[in-house]
Image: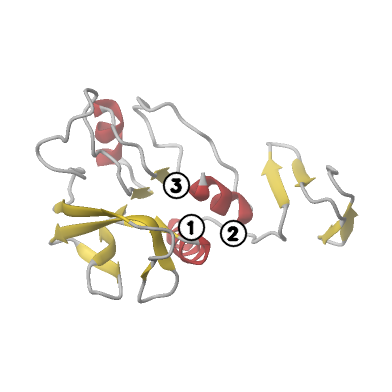
Amino acid sequence: FEAYKTLRKLGLNIDILPPDTADLSAYKLVLAPGVATLSAEFLDALAIHQGIALIGPRSNSKTTEFAIPLPLPPNLPGMNATVARVESLPPDVPVPLTAGGNFLHWREKVETTAEVVETTSDGWPALIRSAGLHYLAGWPDEAAFTRMLTSLCHEAGIETDPLPEGLRRRDSATHRFVFNYNAVPVEWGGEIIPPAGVS
């Protein structure tokens, strides 16, 4: 849900796909946050995906019988990475990221030969990549998620449009809808959108 909210705050359209999706070719950016069991169809589609993908944390970490799979997670196509240890984080124990923000609730200690894009303050990989495939080793807070997703959108050639608090948009082939979820009016694009209003 945090990934969804962050993408919507960046003004993006989002499609939620079934877990056995076998074709990702229509998407420049694909996310699979916390999807414990990644289907064989999805993994095959991911292996040939030409865009950017952000998988994790906790993705591909359980079999359909809820066992820990072998090889160990994340076991993603073309990425040499193993989650060696995991930690549940108490609410008052964030793990700072060197680029800003924190991991909250959950983190993974990943051993990898993939490119390390970001680290935690204690030196563990926070975000790794192999070509366009990225793996996230914890639950980022809003600041970190916004920074990471903005960067990945830029890399994928997707324009972001950060929206005011409570304002969301959805584009169709012919129209742009703007929704104000606030109890107060919001000005956007030279227009005042009333509380709970749609433009």
Q: Is residue 24 left or right of residue 59?
A: right
Mark 2 sits on what residue? 160
Rendered residue at 28%/28% (across/down):
39
Taking the view exactly as shown, the residue that stands out farthest to the left is 71
Q: Is residue 136 above or below residue 179?
A: below
Rendering quarter of residue 98: bottom left
Dots 2, 1 in contact, CB < 8 A: yes
Secondary structure found at label 2: loop
Secondary structure found at label 3: loop
Mark 1 sits on what residue? 153
Q: Amino acid at mark 2?
A: Thr
Q: Residues within 10 Å of mark 1 (few under 14, many from 20)?
A: some
Mark 3 sits on what residue? 28
Rendered residue at 28%/26% (across/down):
41
Q: Give the mark nearest the N terminus, 2 or 1.
A: 1
Q: Residues within 10 Å of mark 2 (few under 14, many from 20)?
A: some
Where in the figure is residue 173, as x and y percent of width and height?
68, 36
Q: Nearer the viewer, residue 76 or 86?
A: 86
Q: Give the mark nearest the N terminus, 1 or 3.
A: 3
Where in the figure is residue 120, as x and y percent of width and height?
30, 70
Q: Residues within 10 Å of mark 3 (few under 14, many from 20)?
A: some
Q: Give the mark nearest the N terminus, 2 or 3.
A: 3
